[in-house]
Amino acid sequence: MSHSVVSWLLLIISTVYMCDTSADESEINQLNEHYQSLNSLSIQLSFRDMLSDWKNVGNLKSLEKQWLHFGSRLDALAERDLSLCESILTHAMQTTSDSQLLAIELLGQPVTYRGNISELPRAKDWYRLLTLFWLGEAVSPDELFEIGETSFNKAIARLRTIKQDSNGASNSSFSNKDTAAIQKAYLDRHHRVIQNLNKLFIDSENIPPLTIARSPLGPEFLAPGYYNPDQKQFYFHVSNDDYIKAQMDFLYLHEGLPGHHMQSHWPDEKLKCNRLSMPPSAMAFVEGWAAYIERYGRDLGLYQEPESEYYAYKWQALRAMRVMVDVGKHAYGWSDNKLKQHWKQLFPEGIDMLERELARIKRWPMQVNTYVYGRHKIERLLAEQQRKADFNLVEFHQQLLSMTHLPLSSIERYNDFNNIK
């Protein structure tokens, strides 16, 4: 799970459009330059902080005029014969334009956030705005809830099977002060995964070295680790007296190889539509990839102890439960008591995480859905591709890594990308 969101957004937003075009290249480039020059309402993890910044943005009418003018230029391209890369770029720009105009409209009336989107004026539109920002497309609350529920049922069934077969999960842990031992344990996992990467990936030799360090953040940080792409560093976060060993396998896979570290430093020459100027909605692909890749722990030399695999499924169930809780809180207007009852009834194994995650969902609405929604889309594509007689998992991963800097909606054009070499 990556919470160095500012670094990710800078990495995504600052990228430059470099793609062979079938339309007038100068026209596309000019449109892209216009897009880059626009002022915008920026996305943040904290919804309250984001609203506070937006209220100080200045003249909303002027900002609206900028985006309306840009939208008219986009509309002029609607009838053009666009290449695949041009189509993806303009669609991403259109999504950003739509979300900016909707945000400006919603800011036309006073908004006070108290931890529940459903209490805001025009709550449905606010929730839709957050799906555009974080998922890159408008997804209904009912669809999101169903995806979360289905994912949860699969994960919890597997978790309970492991628990039954292994007579429970171990609570073996390091002292929170034993930084050197924790770091060494992660490095051991790192070397084990490197030895097995060729089972699932090509072109992994050119990925720069990963460094692993203890997080300098305080106990208020709400995640067990994060990745900083600028520093090429995975930070494990110690917030309790003990650091549970069982969480280390899935967390390394997610933040290190072949998760965020591999995808953020995939060779530029291997990227499809090389470095389009993408909006932050690419985060659903970023987090979806890292969540998806956790399923291959055994292939990569990890999950050798039942408790490690148990913990991986516990986190998979946790993420899916968070989707249901996010929708319940922010779209359906569930009370805290109803949310807690739902959690405790379905997920007693995760009661230890309930209060922390509920606080996170209130502070960071919608962000928690990127993991499950992204993984869901990738696994649905995987199932489709596996039906082909010539399916090759290594090539599938190669293709996906070449697309993960793009919006998640690009997955719908997966087969078209085969024509881009």
Image (cartoon, rainbow, N blue to C red):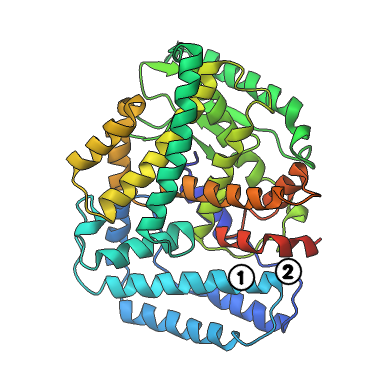
**Spot occupied by residue 396 in the image (x, y as percentages of width and height):** 73, 48
Q: Which mark is residue 19?
A: 2
Q: Which of marks 1 and 2 is nearer the N terminus?
A: 2
Q: Can residue 370 be seen?
A: yes
Residue that badge 1 annotates:
89
The amino acid on which the numbered mark 1 sits, given as a three-letter code, is: Leu
Q: Nearer the viewer, residue 108 or 56?
A: 108
| Res 273 → quadrant | bottom right
Q: From what the image shows, is residue 103 above or below residue 348?
A: below
Residue at 76% across / 72% down in the picture? 20
Query: Left of 295 or right of it: where is 372?
Result: left
Residue at 34% across / 51% down in the picture? 365
| Res 274 → quadrant | bottom right
Q: Residue 63 carries which label?
A: none
Label 2 near label 1: C-beta < 8 Å? Answer: yes
- For label 1, the crowd category at 10 Å Cα-Cα, with few meaning under 14, some 14 to 19 and many 20 or more, is many
For the residues labelled 1 and 2, the Cα–Cα distance comes to: 10 Å
Residue at 68% across / 51% down in the picture? 400
